[in-house]
Image (cartoon, rainbow, N blue to C red):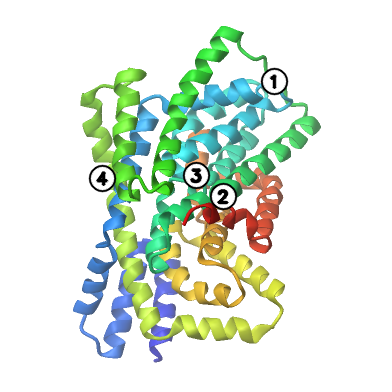
Amino acid sequence: MSPVLVLLVSFVFLLIIGVPIAFCLGISALLTAFNMGLTPLVIAQRIATGIQPFPLIAIPLFVLAGAIMSKGGVAKRIVDFAYVIVGPFRGGLAMVNCIQSMLFGGVSGSAIADISSTGPIMIPMMVKKGYDREFSTSITVASATQGIIIPPSHNMIIFAMSAGGVSIAKLFLAGYIPGIMVGLSLMIASYIIAVKRGYPREKRPPLGESLLIIKDGILSMLAAIIIVGGIALGIFTATEASAIAVLYAAFLGIVVYKEMSIRDLWPIILDSVKTISTVLFLIGSASAFGWIMTYLHVPAIVTNLFLGLTDNRVILLLLINILLVCLGMVMDVAPLIVIVTPVLLPVVQSLGLSATTFAIVLLLNLGIGLTTPPVGTGLFVGCSVGKTTMEKTAKSTIVLWPAMIIVLLLITFVPWFTTFLPSLIK
């Protein structure tokens, strides 16, 4: 059998029978190596090499920073901050959900962390005020996708490594405008839905209380400003920024907000290690899988296949977006980035898209995939937090997809949205 067929057929088969994705990638790469007569040590070496790059150290530290912020009261203060800003509008709590995801995403860098941290606050609050439980859950899940676009996103670091050393600072800056666009589009959709369904508006807290809430909110959001500003200005690297994020998060939680103690750090670190181990194993296995694909010239084959379909740039980009959304429905974000980046990056570059633009297009597609069945991680976590079923929540999420898809098309065909801020730095 052709090595390419061995790779793809074994991977799909293992995926269908329910083998965890990291093992699917590693086993299919190993079977292909046997088929080609390569020593299995090559695959072990590629797995080790995949998790060796120094910038990847930033990933566990950003994950830890997000976990400390969740425990230390940062999420609650960001929710309160958003409440002061948009609460009085019709459907204000739904808009609060969008804004807090925009702000917390810029701090935690993770959609799942956003859902897990602010979902238990927002969903019961919305249900109590008369919102449907399914809509409350779906807007929480959909808005959380901003966490993988707005920096600091550890998925951007994975993309930078997979793409062969794209500037992490430029990737971080490229995510701001699209991330805000996603938040605004979901707020508009929420307002329209709120008007149709008669969802309430909220009263803003008294002036003194509002000013205190704003002060605490700004302190929480300073983390994102320090991290991205420091990287963009060349003050420190992404890896150093992740360590600063951990220190700042601990300082807020222990010293400023006093919602955790030093003793709380150890269980947080243990939980973070479990998440980090899973992510790094995925990256290593996906790296071996990607190396095998490159060895077999799969990227060149795919490039020729796409370019042979049509010479219409618009149709090709639409097809790539459809492919990415479909892949995002059945696979997790991290392994998909490592797998599809070396395959599709040459294709989109031949169509005139920069690596920076493609990174945001890829991440937004995979973010939409987090909200879709059958394997949308964000959807599963949201349903667990919201105490509802995936079927009901998926139906409710459908009305929010058009808002996200419009933004996706805008950043695909108008590169300015992703290139303006990165162009301001050298």
Q: Position of residue 422 (x, y in %)?
A: 52, 54
Which residue position is annotated with label 3? 147
Which residue position is annotated with label 2? 371
Q: Nearer the viewer, mark 1 or mark 2?
A: 1
Q: Earlier in the sequence, mark 2 or mark 4?
A: 4
* Gap in angstroms between the C-alphas marked 1 and 2: 28 Å
Q: Nearer the viewer, mark 4 or mark 3?
A: 3
Q: Could you say which is closer to the camera, residue 329 or residue 289? A: 289
Is the residue under label 1 in contact with that under label 4 (CB below 8 Å)?
Answer: no
Q: Relative to 3, say whether 359 is above or below.
A: above
Which residue position is annotated with label 1? 88
**Amino acid, disc 1:** Pro
Which residue position is annotated with label 4? 273
* Gap in angstroms between the C-alphas marked 1 and 3: 25 Å
* Gap in angstroms between the C-alphas marked 4 and 3: 20 Å
Q: Relative to 13, say whether 326 is above or below.
A: above
Q: Position of residue 188 (x, y in %)?
A: 72, 38
**Amino acid, disc 4:** Val
**Amino acid, disc 2:** Thr
Q: Which numbered disc covers residue 24?
A: none
Q: Position of residue 110 (x, y in %)?
A: 44, 44
Q: Earlier in the sequence, mark 2 or mark 3?
A: 3
